[in-house]
Image (cartoon, rainbow, N blue to C red):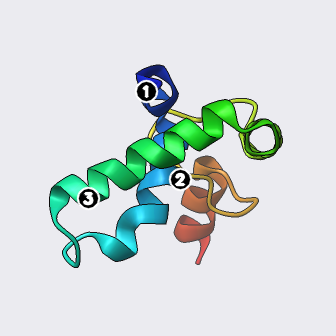
Amino acid sequence: MDASLLDDPWIAAQVDAAVAPYVGRLPAHEVAWMREQLAEVLVHDEEASRLLRRAHPREVDESGERAFGVLGAAERARATKAG
């Protein structure tokens, strides 16, 4: 398995989401095997690798903050004070 592939938080999240329906239904070692197999396919299958490159965001936001619409924090604060 290419461990560096699953070191990418976005890819790990996609793989985890793919195996999530099986967590608790299959033994942990089988779910781990499924994760490894998915990673192997993403590394070695030409079409899967191409799709992964196209789907992967160019830059993953690691700030922990989320955008909420077009209003920024200052605009929301002003709207709260006014209303």
The location of residue 44, given as percent across then percent down, is: 66, 32
Q: Secondary structure at mark 1?
A: helix
Distance, label 2 to label 1, CA atoms, is 12 Å
Relative placement, left or right, of 51 versus 24 is: right
* Label 3 sits on residue: 30
- First in sequence: mark 2 or mark 1? 1
The amino acid sitting under disc 1 is Asp
Q: Is residue 59 above or below residue 45?
A: above
The reply to whether dot 2 and dot 1 touch (C-beta < 8 Å) is: no
The residue that appears at 26% across and 58% down in the rendered structure is 30
x and y, in percent, of residue 66 in the image: 55, 51
Badge 3: residue crowd in 10 Å (few <14, some 14–19, many ≥20): few
Give the image location of residue 71, x and y in percent.
70, 59
Residue plotted at (76% across, 59% down):
70
Asked if 33 appears above or below 6 in the picture, the reply is: below
Residue drawn at x 28%, y 50% as measured from the top left: 32
Residue bearing mark 2: 14
Q: Position of residue 65 (x, y in %)?
A: 49, 44
Cα gap from disc 1 to disc 3, whole angstroms: 20 Å
Q: Which quadrant is the C terminus positioned in? A: bottom right
> Is tag 2's residue or tag 3's residue first in the polypeptide sequence?
2
Q: Quadrant of the N terminus?
A: top left
Q: Earlier in the sequence, mark 1 or mark 3?
A: 1
Rendered image: mark on residue 54: none
Q: Amino acid at mark 3?
A: Glu
Q: CA distance from mark 2 to mark 3?
A: 18 Å
Q: Answer yes or no: is residue 64 visible.
A: yes
Instruction: Name the residue carrying label 1.
Output: 7
Q: Is residue 35 left or right of residue 30?
A: right
Q: Work out whether residue 5 or residue 59 is closer to the camera in this orientation and state it.
A: 5
* Camera-side mark, 1 or 3: 3
